[in-house]
Amino acid sequence: MVVPTMDSLPRVPDTHGDTVDEKVFSDLYIRTSWFDAAIALDQIEKGKARGRRSAVYMRSLFQSHLYNLGCSIQKHAGKVLFVAILVLSTFCVGLKSATVHSKVHQLWIQEGGSLEHELAYTQKSLGEMDSSTHQLLIQTPKDMDASILHANTLLAHLDVVSSAINVKVHMYDIEWSLKDMCYSPNIPNFDTHFIEQIFENIIPCAIITPLDCFW
């Protein structure tokens, strides 16, 4: 008994098959271009159907290439699996030299720029916890050739910073503010919780801004 190969099998299913074949056969008539674009293209060229020939041709081309690719993968399943495992193993070896950034600002701050030096100085001077993050405010002029170091833009900068400090958000029945997530100097530990709360309210958030030059 000779077992039929994949190439010898008809692309059109048997009308006297099981329920699956009947479903596929109905799709061939209802959604011909989706099921087999080559048949739909042949019907359009014979004038028995209407449609966008270019779109059906591209779909039939993709379906033909994907069909041949699937047949090749099935014939050489062991080789394909070996190559896939080899590629994944190579990527796993490269993970040893990968750098993991746990903070968002590290993804887009210019390396060696002034902002990076300011953040490093703040971290060195005030200290930093593992869970702390930086909230950055970027101000740019409307004209790229203009300078923002004049009175009007600095006053606008002051208004934006003041508004950001006063923002309050109600979530999980708790009122949150910038103080709950900002960067503030460390305070000594006290046995009395009431004293710690007083210091937390007195010590403001550490904000580095060009306005520091005008105090």
Image: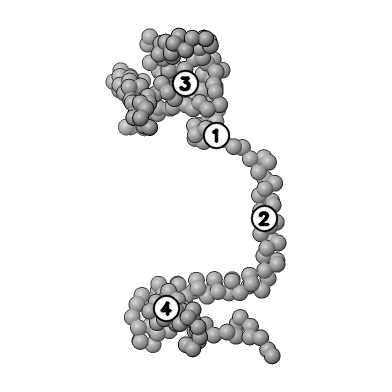
Amino acid under disc 1: Ser
Amino acid under disc 4: Asp
- Asked whether residue 187 is in view, the answer is yes
**Circle 1 residue:** 102
Q: CA distance from mark 4 to mark 2?
A: 38 Å
Amino acid under disc 2: Val
Q: How many C-alpha atoms fall within 10 Å of the one at disc 3: few (<14), some, or many (≥20)? A: many
**Circle 2 residue:** 87
**Circle 4 residue:** 27
Q: CA distance from mark 3 to mark 4?
A: 62 Å
Q: Is residue 110 left or right of residue 30?
A: right
Measured as percent of width and height from the top left, residue 22 is found at 45, 82
Q: CA distance from mark 3 to mark 2?
A: 43 Å
Q: CA distance from mark 2 to mark 1?
A: 27 Å
> Which numbered tag is attached to residue 183?
3
**Residue at the (59%, 37%) spot, across then down:** 100
Q: CA distance from mark 1 to mark 3?
A: 17 Å
**Residue at the (45%, 72%) spot, across then down:** 59
Q: How many C-alpha atoms fall within 10 Å of the one at disc 2: few (<14), some, or many (≥20)? A: few
Sequence-first disc among 2 and 1: 2
Q: How many C-alpha atoms fall within 10 Å of the one at disc 1: few (<14), some, or many (≥20)? A: few
Q: Nearer the viewer, residue 90 or 145?
A: 90
**Residue at the (39%, 87%) spot, across then down:** 46
In the figure, 158 relative to 73: above or below? above
Q: Is residue 130 left or right of residue 153?
A: right
Secondary structure under tag 4 reads: helix
Q: How many C-alpha atoms fall within 10 Å of the one at disc 4: few (<14), some, or many (≥20)? A: some
Secondary structure under tag 1 reads: loop
Q: Nearer the viewer, residue 21 or 36?
A: 21
Q: How many marks?
A: 4
Secondary structure under tag 2 reads: helix
Sequence-first disc among 3 and 2: 2
